[in-house]
Image (spheres, grey):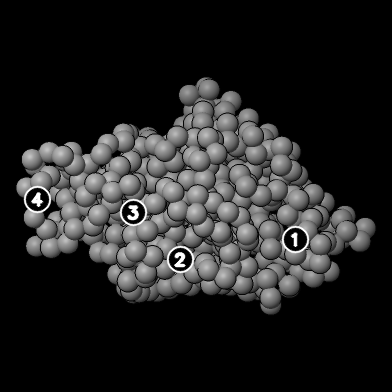
Amino acid sequence: MTRTVIRGGLVITAAEETHADVLIEDGKVAALAASDSDCARGWSADRTIDAAGKYVIPGGVDPHTHMEMPFGGTFAADTFETGTRAAAWGGTTTIVDFAIQTAGHALREGLDAWHLKAGGNCAIDYAFHMILSDVNDSSLKEMDLLVDEGCTSFKLFMAYPGVFYSDDGQILRAMQRGAANGGLIMMHAENGIAIDVLVEQALAAGRTDPRYHGEVRKALLEAEATHRAIQLARVAGAPLYVVHVSAEEAVAELAQARDKGLPVFGETCPQYLFLSTDNLAEPDFEGAKYVCSTPLRPREHQAALWRGLRTNDLQVVSTDHCPFCFTGQKELGRGDFSKIPNGMPGVENRMDLLHQAVVDSHMSRRRWIEIACATPARMFGLYPKKGTIAPGADADIVIYDPMAQQTISAETHHMNVDYSAYEGKQITGQVETVLSRGVTVIDQRQYTGRAGHGQYIPRDTCQYLT
């Protein structure tokens, strides 16, 4: 039995903050005790970590990543090996990635393909959602089997006609199945049919620069799709989780539904909280770095997102990490913004950016842990194994220096992408040491992990619905 003690830190969970020592035995949290107590002083260990003056927090749970994702004739630049290593550097110890069903093929085929990509390659633990690209009798039946196996959430798209798009009838059928089998439906809520008309009109008028990506994917079309998804979920009697919410009007639709007591949930991402259409408008095609969908919005939308996080109308901050290099990938869209691969890097930056939000008084420390660790774990059936520091939980623990100063830059990040969306941003706070199931993967800002340490985690159903 291996024993580690973390001494002298401020332990922060979603529930409380307490000065406590943490005892770890064989990859699990065994006990917590007040740092000055006889109990804690009596612990012996193979290794002692000094956390004096530091935060001791749960490892982050990022429930929305796309490693090695095919899109627009290319693939996301991060593999499961590089992406999970970068996640560890940023204090994230669990990701939930998206396996993709190819239209005309079985869900199982897609899930097996993603297991092959990830298996033996991850530095941290991982799980999968399933993207439904082809809703039919066969795939609906397969949903039941996947839920039983621990793949308990399914993403559909109201966007990207001809690629991932599902019509309202298909969405309703999938929601009905989710209501029956306990699976959570995740929705990319944008009116893709209308957006395609606006894209065609913009290109015909010679509006080809990256900034027009944001202009055609209008906030009202995100809000309309969010409203429609909520109503379809009501008809189906199903819960709904809306991914990457970016627009004030979409937040209002979620708030209204939640005020009615409906089981409707929403996530946003750091790019919507810290970046804006000003970035999309950067000259010399630099705006292509910021092309993602839903798109970045004008800066005035940010206040509604921060407010939604404080009022719990938004419950989760994920990254939607889907990096494409500027050189050779984003450049595919020179002269036609619709050909720019959609996605941005961020899996390494989320925990730090949200700590900066604490520094900037947007939220409390406990809320930081709630939206980045505990709620994602509960939402996707991983709690209390993940997302907290409590006896019996996996010892996924981060020693965090709240006073460290750092500057985010592509020169120092570990994601396999040639730019940073937050280049030059100065922030307060930095990950110092990271444990994954009790094994040190970052030690005093040195990487000590390895590909293959990360394990696949089957998930329970959403714990907000029990």
Spot occupied by residue 357 in the image (x, y as percentages of width and height): 53, 42
Residue at the disc numbered 1: 287
Q: Can you tell which of label 2 and label 3 is closer to the viewer?
A: 3
Q: Secondary structure at mark 1?
A: helix
Q: Residue 89: x percent and y percent? A: 42, 63
Q: Is 352 left or right of 244, judged from the image as shown? A: left
Disc 4 residue crowd, few under 14, some 14–19, many 20+, Cα 10 Å? some
Answer with mark 2 or mark 3, whichever residue precedes in sequence. Answer: 2
Position of residue 72 measured from the top left corner of the image (x, y, whole percent): 67, 69
Q: Disc 1 to disc 3, how far (Cα)? A: 34 Å
The residue that mark 4 highlights is: 43
Between 13 and 122, the residue placed more toward the observer is 13
Q: Which residue is mark 2?
A: 86
Assess whether mark 3 and mark 1 are in contact (beta carbons under 8 angstroms).
Answer: no
Question: How many neighbours does mark 2 have within 10 angstroms: few (below 14), some (14-19), or many (20 or more)?
Answer: many
Give the percent coordinates (x, y) of residue 332. Answer: 73, 73
Look at 37% across and 52% down and name the residue there.
Answer: 400
Badge 1 amino acid: Gly
Element type at mark 2? helix
Q: Which residue is mark 3?
A: 398
Q: Of tags 2 and 4, which is closer to the observer?
A: 4
Q: Nearer the viewer, residue 151 or 145?
A: 151
Give the secondary structure at mark 3: strand
Q: Earlier in the sequence, mark 4 or mark 1?
A: 4
Q: Earlier in the sequence, mark 1 or mark 3?
A: 1
The alpha-carbon separation of the residues under discs 4 and 3 comes to 20 Å
Is residue 465 placed above or below 351 in the rendered structure?
above
Q: Amino acid at mark 4?
A: Trp
Look at 11% across and 58% down and name the residue there.
Answer: 45
